[in-house]
Amino acid sequence: MTDSTTRGASYRDEDWYGEDLSGRRFVDCTFSAVDLSEVRTSGTHFENCVFDGCRFNSSVHESSAFIACEFRRCNFFDATLAGCKVSGSLFDECTMKPMKIRGGLWRGVVLRGNDLTGVDLSGLDLRDADLSLCNLTKAHLRGTQLAGAGVAQTNLREADLRGATLEQVDLRDADLFRTKVDLAGAVLLAELSGALVDTST
Protein backbone atom coordinates (compact mmCIF):
# COMPACT_ATOMS: atom_id res chain seq x y z
CA MET A 1 0.00 0.00 0.00
CA THR A 2 1.35 3.44 -0.94
CA ASP A 3 2.03 5.75 2.01
CA SER A 4 -0.07 8.88 1.47
CA THR A 5 1.55 10.76 4.38
CA THR A 6 3.39 14.04 3.72
CA ARG A 7 5.65 15.21 6.56
CA GLY A 8 7.34 18.55 7.17
CA ALA A 9 6.54 20.04 3.76
CA SER A 10 6.15 23.78 3.14
CA TYR A 11 3.75 25.15 0.52
CA ARG A 12 3.66 28.84 -0.39
CA ASP A 13 1.50 30.79 -2.88
CA GLU A 14 0.22 27.58 -4.47
CA ASP A 15 -3.10 27.10 -6.25
CA TRP A 16 -4.92 23.97 -5.03
CA TYR A 17 -8.31 25.25 -6.17
CA GLY A 18 -10.89 22.46 -6.40
CA GLU A 19 -8.48 19.63 -5.62
CA ASP A 20 -9.67 16.43 -3.95
CA LEU A 21 -7.41 15.63 -0.97
CA SER A 22 -9.48 12.73 0.32
CA GLY A 23 -7.54 10.09 2.22
CA ARG A 24 -4.34 12.18 2.34
CA ARG A 25 -2.34 12.74 5.54
CA PHE A 26 -0.27 15.85 6.30
CA VAL A 27 1.91 16.07 9.42
CA ASP A 28 3.98 19.11 10.54
CA CYS A 29 3.33 20.90 7.23
CA THR A 30 3.10 24.66 6.60
CA PHE A 31 0.66 26.22 4.13
CA SER A 32 1.26 29.93 3.41
CA ALA A 33 -1.15 31.88 1.16
CA VAL A 34 -2.33 28.63 -0.44
CA ASP A 35 -5.64 28.77 -2.32
CA LEU A 36 -7.71 25.86 -0.98
CA SER A 37 -11.00 27.20 -2.33
CA GLU A 38 -13.52 24.49 -3.25
CA VAL A 39 -11.11 21.80 -2.06
CA ARG A 40 -12.77 18.56 -0.96
CA THR A 41 -11.51 16.34 1.84
CA SER A 42 -12.95 13.11 3.17
CA GLY A 43 -11.10 11.16 5.81
CA THR A 44 -8.16 13.55 5.35
CA HIS A 45 -5.82 14.04 8.32
CA PHE A 46 -3.89 17.22 9.15
CA GLU A 47 -1.77 17.14 12.30
CA ASN A 48 0.36 19.96 13.76
CA CYS A 49 -0.01 21.89 10.51
CA VAL A 50 0.07 25.68 10.13
CA PHE A 51 -2.22 27.50 7.69
CA ASP A 52 -1.28 31.17 7.27
CA GLY A 53 -3.36 33.43 5.03
CA CYS A 54 -5.01 30.50 3.26
CA ARG A 55 -8.39 30.55 1.50
CA PHE A 56 -10.85 27.75 2.27
CA ASN A 57 -13.76 29.45 0.48
CA SER A 58 -16.57 27.03 -0.42
CA SER A 59 -14.41 24.04 0.53
CA VAL A 60 -16.11 20.87 1.85
CA HIS A 61 -14.58 18.70 4.57
CA GLU A 62 -16.27 15.47 5.65
CA SER A 63 -15.05 13.28 8.52
CA SER A 64 -11.63 14.89 8.25
CA ALA A 65 -9.26 15.77 11.11
CA PHE A 66 -7.37 18.97 11.89
CA ILE A 67 -5.50 18.05 15.08
CA ALA A 68 -3.50 20.73 16.92
CA CYS A 69 -3.37 22.90 13.78
CA GLU A 70 -3.00 26.68 13.57
CA PHE A 71 -5.18 28.77 11.27
CA ARG A 72 -3.99 32.37 11.06
CA ARG A 73 -5.83 34.99 8.97
CA CYS A 74 -7.58 32.26 6.96
CA ASN A 75 -10.86 32.72 5.09
CA PHE A 76 -13.57 30.06 5.57
CA PHE A 77 -16.30 31.90 3.65
CA ASP A 78 -19.07 29.39 2.82
CA ALA A 79 -16.88 26.44 3.90
CA THR A 80 -18.52 23.25 5.22
CA LEU A 81 -17.10 21.05 7.98
CA ALA A 82 -19.20 17.95 8.62
CA GLY A 83 -18.29 15.48 11.34
CA CYS A 84 -14.72 16.77 11.54
CA LYS A 85 -12.29 16.51 14.44
CA VAL A 86 -10.68 19.88 15.09
CA SER A 87 -9.45 19.25 18.64
CA GLY A 88 -6.69 21.45 20.03
CA SER A 89 -6.57 23.73 16.97
CA LEU A 90 -6.26 27.52 17.03
CA PHE A 91 -8.12 30.04 14.87
CA ASP A 92 -6.62 33.53 14.91
CA GLU A 93 -8.18 36.46 13.02
CA CYS A 94 -10.04 34.12 10.68
CA THR A 95 -13.13 34.86 8.60
CA MET A 96 -15.58 32.20 9.80
CA LYS A 97 -18.94 33.33 8.47
CA PRO A 98 -20.98 32.29 6.75
CA MET A 99 -19.66 28.83 7.57
CA LYS A 100 -21.48 25.50 7.92
CA ILE A 101 -20.45 23.28 10.83
CA ARG A 102 -22.38 20.03 11.13
CA GLY A 103 -21.39 18.15 14.26
CA GLY A 104 -17.89 17.06 15.10
CA LEU A 105 -15.33 17.15 17.88
CA TRP A 106 -13.88 20.61 18.54
CA ARG A 107 -12.67 19.96 22.06
CA GLY A 108 -10.05 22.38 23.38
CA VAL A 109 -10.17 24.53 20.26
CA VAL A 110 -9.06 28.17 20.61
CA LEU A 111 -11.50 30.54 18.89
CA ARG A 112 -10.65 33.53 21.06
CA GLY A 113 -11.76 36.86 19.58
CA ASN A 114 -13.23 35.48 16.34
CA ASP A 115 -16.51 36.70 14.87
CA LEU A 116 -19.02 33.82 14.83
CA THR A 117 -22.16 35.93 14.52
CA GLY A 118 -25.11 33.73 13.56
CA VAL A 119 -23.00 30.60 13.03
CA ASP A 120 -24.78 27.31 13.75
CA LEU A 121 -22.74 25.36 16.33
CA SER A 122 -25.63 23.16 17.43
CA GLY A 123 -24.66 19.76 18.82
CA LEU A 124 -20.95 20.46 18.51
CA ASP A 125 -18.48 19.18 21.12
CA LEU A 126 -16.80 22.39 22.33
CA ARG A 127 -15.71 21.15 25.75
CA ASP A 128 -12.76 23.10 27.18
CA ALA A 129 -12.80 25.46 24.19
CA ASP A 130 -11.61 29.06 24.53
CA LEU A 131 -14.50 31.22 23.32
CA SER A 132 -13.48 34.32 25.24
CA LEU A 133 -13.90 37.66 23.45
CA CYS A 134 -15.82 35.91 20.64
CA ASN A 135 -18.82 37.51 19.00
CA LEU A 136 -21.49 34.80 19.17
CA THR A 137 -24.45 37.14 18.66
CA LYS A 138 -27.46 35.13 17.44
CA ALA A 139 -25.30 32.00 17.25
CA HIS A 140 -27.02 28.62 17.53
CA LEU A 141 -25.58 26.59 20.42
CA ARG A 142 -28.55 24.36 21.04
CA GLY A 143 -27.44 21.03 22.50
CA THR A 144 -23.79 22.05 22.25
CA GLN A 145 -21.35 20.54 24.75
CA LEU A 146 -19.72 23.55 26.42
CA ALA A 147 -18.49 22.04 29.69
CA GLY A 148 -15.33 23.80 30.82
CA ALA A 149 -15.42 26.33 27.97
CA GLY A 150 -14.06 29.83 28.57
CA VAL A 151 -16.50 32.64 27.81
CA ALA A 152 -14.87 35.70 29.39
CA GLN A 153 -16.23 38.84 27.69
CA THR A 154 -17.98 36.69 25.10
CA ASN A 155 -20.90 38.31 23.28
CA LEU A 156 -23.80 35.85 23.52
CA ARG A 157 -26.54 38.38 22.83
CA GLU A 158 -29.64 36.66 21.40
CA ALA A 159 -27.74 33.35 21.13
CA ASP A 160 -29.60 30.07 21.69
CA LEU A 161 -28.12 28.04 24.57
CA ARG A 162 -31.10 25.78 25.16
CA GLY A 163 -30.04 22.22 25.87
CA ALA A 164 -26.35 23.15 26.00
CA THR A 165 -24.21 21.53 28.69
CA LEU A 166 -22.82 24.36 30.82
CA GLU A 167 -20.98 22.62 33.66
CA GLN A 168 -17.93 24.63 34.80
CA VAL A 169 -18.84 27.49 32.47
CA ASP A 170 -18.62 30.89 34.19
CA LEU A 171 -21.20 33.02 32.40
CA ARG A 172 -20.94 35.98 34.77
CA ASP A 173 -18.59 37.92 32.50
CA ALA A 174 -20.45 37.15 29.25
CA ASP A 175 -23.00 39.44 27.56
CA LEU A 176 -26.28 37.52 27.88
CA PHE A 177 -28.79 40.10 26.66
CA ARG A 178 -31.86 38.19 25.41
CA THR A 179 -29.89 34.93 25.37
CA LYS A 180 -32.18 31.89 25.21
CA VAL A 181 -31.62 29.35 28.00
CA ASP A 182 -33.63 26.39 29.29
CA LEU A 183 -34.55 25.74 32.93
CA ALA A 184 -31.17 24.19 33.74
CA GLY A 185 -29.41 27.20 32.27
CA ALA A 186 -31.63 29.60 34.19
CA VAL A 187 -30.86 27.78 37.43
CA LEU A 188 -27.12 27.95 36.71
CA LEU A 189 -27.30 31.68 36.02
CA ALA A 190 -29.25 32.25 39.22
CA GLU A 191 -26.69 30.30 41.25
CA LEU A 192 -23.81 32.20 39.66
CA SER A 193 -25.53 35.39 40.77
CA GLY A 194 -25.57 34.14 44.35
CA ALA A 195 -29.18 32.98 44.53
CA LEU A 196 -30.18 29.88 46.48
CA VAL A 197 -32.34 27.92 44.07
CA ASP A 198 -35.00 25.77 45.71
CA THR A 199 -36.46 23.23 43.29
CA SER A 200 -38.33 21.24 45.94
CA THR A 201 -41.58 23.13 45.47
Image (cartoon, rainbow, N blue to C red):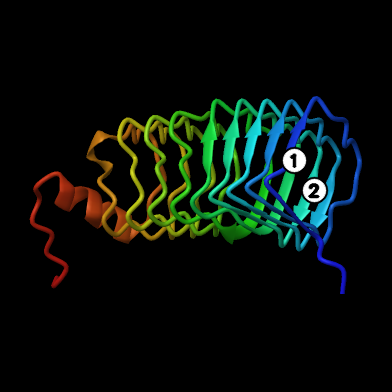
| Marks 2/1: CA–CA distance | 6 Å
Q: Give whichever of 157, 84 is nearer the camera.
A: 84
Taking the spot 87% from the left edge, 74% from the top edge, the residue there is 1
User: In the figure, residue 118 lies in which quadrant?
Assistant: top right
Give the labeled residue for mark 1.
Answer: 79
Q: Point out residue 183 in the picture as x, y percentages from the top left corner.
A: 32, 59
Q: Give whichever of 145, 140 is nearer the camera.
A: 145
The secondary structure type at the circle numbered 1 is: loop
CB within 8 Å, label 2 to label 1? yes
- Asked if residue 199 is positioned above or below residue 5 in the image, the reply reads below
Taking the spot 61% from the left edge, 25% from the top edge, the residue there is 73
Q: Point out residue 79 in the picture as x, y percentages from the top left corner.
A: 75, 40
- Going from N to C along the chain, the mark reached first, 2 or 1, is 2
For the image, the number of numbered tags is 2
Label 2 amino acid?
A: Val
Numbered badge on residue 60: 2
Taking the spot 46% from the left edge, 42% from the top edge, the residue there is 110
Label 1 amino acid?
A: Ala
- Residue 191 as seen in the image, left or right of residue 122: left
Q: Point out residue 197 in the picture as x, y percentages from the top left corner.
A: 13, 59
